[in-house]
Amino acid sequence: MLNPNLDEIQLTKEEYERYSRHLILPEVGLDGQKRLKAASVLCIGTGGLGSPLLLYLAAAGIGRIGIVDFDVVDHSNLQRQVIHGTSWVGKPKIESGKNRILEINPYCQVDLYETRLSSENALDIVKDYDVVVDGTDNFPTRYLVNDACVLLNKPNVYGSIFRFEGQATVFNYEGGPNYRDLYPEPPPPGLVPSCAEGGVLGILPGVIGVIQATETVKIILGTGNTLSGRLLLYDALNMKFRELKLRPNPERPVIEKLIDYEMFCGIPQAKAAEAQAQAEMREITVHELERLMSGESADTYVLLDVRNPNEHQIARIPGAVLVPLPDIENGDGIDKVKELANGSKLIVHCKSGMRSAKAIGILKQAGIEGTNVKGGILAWSREIDSSVPEY
């Protein structure tokens, strides 16, 4: 309802007071606030990006907010997902989000979709909203959100974050580009690390999420210049913003229907290859590792830690020697591993077992056999030594 009948929308006396700083802005005014009240916004995700944008959309007076998420609040979320609190750990994120939104603004209608967005349900969920805001963190869902918005002609307010960098733009708005103009093809699975693997500055999603909220409000008000056709890049370490021009690609494929986005992004193929590699790879449980460490002399085995140095500083298994995976990937660490192994049994661990499996594959090509620690140091912390911090 981007062009509502404003005569049918009324503000209460309390709303006049609540939105007074909006009402005195000529670019918003009474008509603009009524547009916000009449508008509906769908937020995909209540994580790092969804948290700040939902808080500010609610405070701005968006009349109807939909939230799609199927995750629960975890302690590791609280460093950046500011809509959630400690008392909500273990509970659904969408319930936590709704509770906080209604504390901020009881005039919001909050609709919850506790489900994974899929090709089967996306069109039914998206069709009833004026604007869609993408707060997801994976490529299959980003392509799905984009294609659903294209098919239904909905603006798609996009943001993404990693480590100290973020980006934001508006897709599929007034003839502007869509996500496939920025990324015609998805990257190979595993090439781009997730925030869980690479980390993220907790403040970063606050900046990008607020930019997404700002663009959403501008679209509803019909004022200002949106980021459509411009990709805004933010470097938090150097406090720099820069822009890249985006244009529709006249040769891009026409989106006619929703597809299998997991398959499109190569996820099943990668999982099958990973399962095959796991089947062929020697593994050891943390309990077996503990027995080995207590029953054999240290010179019969080498325990290799392929995490990053800062992770090794946070938590470590006794006796583990650090050789980071990037050093193994670029070849610099292979000679060091050969020297360390030198006829001893090589056992490799990381945080959860994924990077160590990758390291073992690289080392095998160099003629070095290794055994993977199943579950990594997280399993060690949970099953062997609870004093080792989880992170």
Image (cartoon, rainbow, N blue to C red):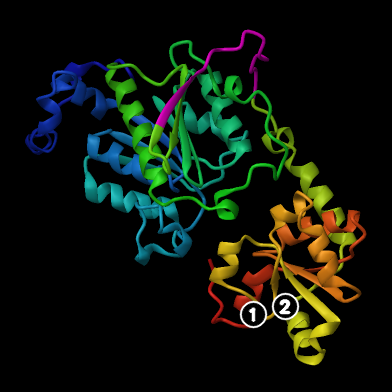
Judging depth in this view, the residue of 238 and 61 nearest the camera is 238
Quick one: 190 or 304, which is closer to the camera?
A: 304
Q: Is residue 344 above or below residue 89?
A: below
Query: Dot 1: within a 10 Å radius of its alpha carbon, few (fewer than 14), some, or many (20 or more) residues?
Result: few
Q: Where in the figure is residue 240, as x and y percent of width and height?
A: 40, 34
Question: Is 108 left or right of 360, judged from the image as shown?
Answer: left
Proximity of marks 1 and 2: CB atoms separated by less than 8 Å = yes
Tell me which residue sits at (13%, 23%) in the image: 25
- The image position of residue 62, as x and y in percent, is 28, 33
Query: Which residue does the numbered mark 1 point to in the structure image?
Result: 383
State the CA–CA distance, disc 1 to disc 2: 8 Å
Q: Is residue 321 left or right of residue 77?
A: right
Q: Is residue 157 visible?
A: no
Residue 250 image position (x, y, % from top left) = 62, 8
For badge 2, the amino acid type reads Val
Range shown magenta = 241-257
In the rendered image, the quadrant that contains the N terminus is top left
Whether residue 253 sits left or right of residue 203 in the image: it is right
User: What's the amino acid at mark 1?
Assistant: Glu
Q: Determine whether the residue tagged by mark 2 lies in a helix, strand or loop.
A: helix
Q: Secondary structure at mark 1?
A: helix
Indicate whether 155 appears above or below 13.
above
Q: Is residue 261 rendered to the left or right of residue 46?
A: right
In-front residue for pair 44/328: 328
Picture quadrant where residue 212 is located? top left
Mark 1 or 2 closer to N-term? 2
Asked which quadrant contains residue 209, the reply is: top left
Q: Which residue is mark 2?
A: 286
